[in-house]
Amino acid sequence: MPANLPLSRLRPGGGSPRRPLHRGLAVLAALPLLALAACGYGSQAADEPAGQKVAAGAEKIDGLDSVKIGYFGNLTHGTALVGVNKGYFQKALGATEASYQVFNAGPSEIEALNSGSIDIGWIGPSPAINGYTRSAGKNLRIVGGSASGGVKLVVNPAEIKSVADVKGKRIATPQLGNTQDVALLNWISEQGWKVDAESGKGDVSVVRTDNKVTPDAYRSGSVDGAWVPEPTASKLVAEGAKVLLDESDLWPDKKFVITNIIVSQKFLAEHPKAVAAVLKASVDVNKYINAHPDEAKAAANAQLKADSGKALPAKVLDPAWKSIRFTDDPLAATLNSEARHAVEAGLLEDPLLDGIYDLAPLNEVLRAAGEPPVDDAGLGVE
């Protein structure tokens, strides 16, 4: 791990005592909602369910007509993409319809969860933290992990050849206060440089740019690099950018949460069997992805095309997929660290994250398969 990012700053208990995060306002007034704009194993897991159709004789789960599932059209949401494409969720839900909604930003998914437009969703850490704290811990729970990694600092090699060269340059992030924005601000601070978090002005110019237009901004010279998730990072590399830093290298064991599974607390309380079914499907999908990476990559790309009308070319898809690790573990200690980074950057008041996790349903799925349980880092329901 690089010396400029000590373990004690990244992991509670790593080199220094963990200091608690106390209850407070979830965000500064200027930040109505932190966002992510790019943002195991079931006991009888099958490699590939037979399509999307309801099996003959299947029954509804918890008496539900449908379970509404949300996700982003990003490779870091590959568990959802593959699960939809291969029919895992529909198979697990039996005669209860699996319906889907694709989102482009964290705030809209949190709003959909709050309104009941979706029941369960794949989402990044910043909007999960913000959604939880803004509701005083009443709207959601994180019930599972999905992915780690898949975030890089990519730069114009003509302008930036080393870490020192980043000073004075223009670096894009997806959105003010989003997961990658917080990570870049934390990294800048670790270099000893100063940046005003809200304006993005300082020793480095942090330019908040939607992932969809970041490649155009790079091509035009409006930015010198970007701290972005996949596949945006690999799209920039295809435009001639170089990877200066893989964020995974800054974390213990090269693991940090990039995508979680959330559920509304009301839905979890009223329909635990449906939640368990979706988690069973998610665990089975991750098993399939890790056992059959090429086939899973193709399935994820096929779903991206179905959702957006456009598949990713191999020169983008292949390196992007390779940089993401799919895991059932929510990596709770790293979520706590990411919250602290937002506090230290001045983007978040100290939140109370106790109770944000309920991993009991997931651990039941894992236990049934003889797999070890995952940990909530002391942030689970009592």
Image: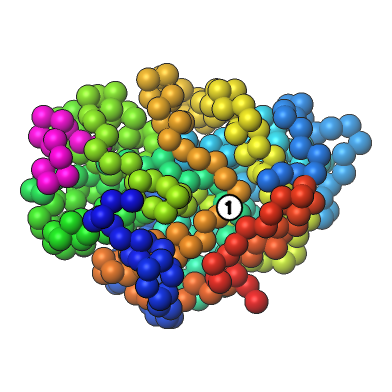
Q: Residue 265: within the magenta?
A: no
Compared to residue 196, the image places residue 23 above or below, namely: below
**85 relative position to 224: left or right:** right
Please give the name of the residue rendered at 40% of the width and 76% of the height, measured from the top-left corner.
Answer: 17
Q: Dot 1: what SS?
A: loop
Residue 238 against residue 148 in the figure, above or below: above
Q: Which residue is mark 1?
A: 329
Q: Residues within 10 Å of mark 1 (few under 14, many from 20)?
A: many
The percent coordinates of residue 99 (x first, y second) are 66, 42
Q: Quadrant of the C terminus?
A: bottom right
**Residue 208 seen in the current view:** yes
Near-viewer residue (16 or 266): 16
**Outermost residue toward the top?**
314
Q: Which residues are magenta?
A: 154-165
Q: Position of residue 24 (x, y in %)?
A: 39, 80
Q: Camera-side residue: 78 or 1?
A: 1
Name which residue lies at 54% across and 67% down.
377
